[in-house]
């Protein structure tokens, strides 16, 4: 629960550093993190299995694309969140993952 709240706060603060990321409020950021956690639990393992051959060929770099796609999928389901493009989603997922390591 604490990790979810910290992730929501970090995601909300990232909008000031990344120009392609926008949240309307901290509530939309919290809802985004809940949806992201659900997608990571139920859908991402399937995407990982499907993308395994490309991940092996690219030495794991395709996982960045999968993570970006998951971020964009969560963005699609949550009103009040706008992430423009796969590039911004990949950068957002990298920064969110690095900060998530500490908590």
Image (cartoon, grey):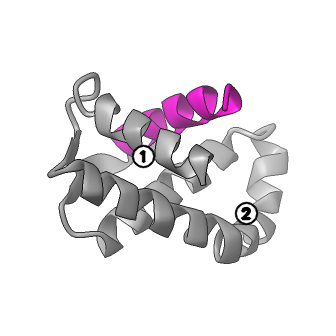
Name which residue lies at 60% across and 43% down.
64
Query: Is tag 1's residue or tag 2's residue first in the polypeptide sequence?
Result: 1
| 72 is higher (above) or lower (below) than 57 | below
Labels 1, 2: front one:
1
Name which residue lies at 63% across and 64% down.
40
The numbered dot on residue 51 is 2
| In the image: residue 51, left or right of residue 59 | left
Name which residue lies at 45% across and 56% down.
71
Give residue 21's quadrant in the image. Answer: top left
Whether residue 87 is visible to the viewer of this picture, yes or no, is no
Q: Main secondary structure of the magenta part?
A: helix
Between 96 and 88, the one nearer to me in the picture = 96
- In the rendered structure, which segment of residues is drawn in magenta? 87-103
- Which residue is under mark 1? 8
The numbered dot on residue 86 is none
Between 9 and 93, the one nearer to me in the picture = 9
Q: Is residue 89 magenta?
A: yes
Coordinates of residue 102 in the picture (x, y in percent): 68, 25
- Image quadrant holding the N terminus, namely bottom right
Q: CA distance from mark 1 to mark 2?
A: 28 Å
- Image quadrant holding the C terminus, namely top right
Disc 2 is placed on an element classified as loop
Coordinates of residue 48 in the picture (x, y in percent): 75, 63
| In the image: residue 76, left or right of residue 23 | right
């Amino acid at each position: 629960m604490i990790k979810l709240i910290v992730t929501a706060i970090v995601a909300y603060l990232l909008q000031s550093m990344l120009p392609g990321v926008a949240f309307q409020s901290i509530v939309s950021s919290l809802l985004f993190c809940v949806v992201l956690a659900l997608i990571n639990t139920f859908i991402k393992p399937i995407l990982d299995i499907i993308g395994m051959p490309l991940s092996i060929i690219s030495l794991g770099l395709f996982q960045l694309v999968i993570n970006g796609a998951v971020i964009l999928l969560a963005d699609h389901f949550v009103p009040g969140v706008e992430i423009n493009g796969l590039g911004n989603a990949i950068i957002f997922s990298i920064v969110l993952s690095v900060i998530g390591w500490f908590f």
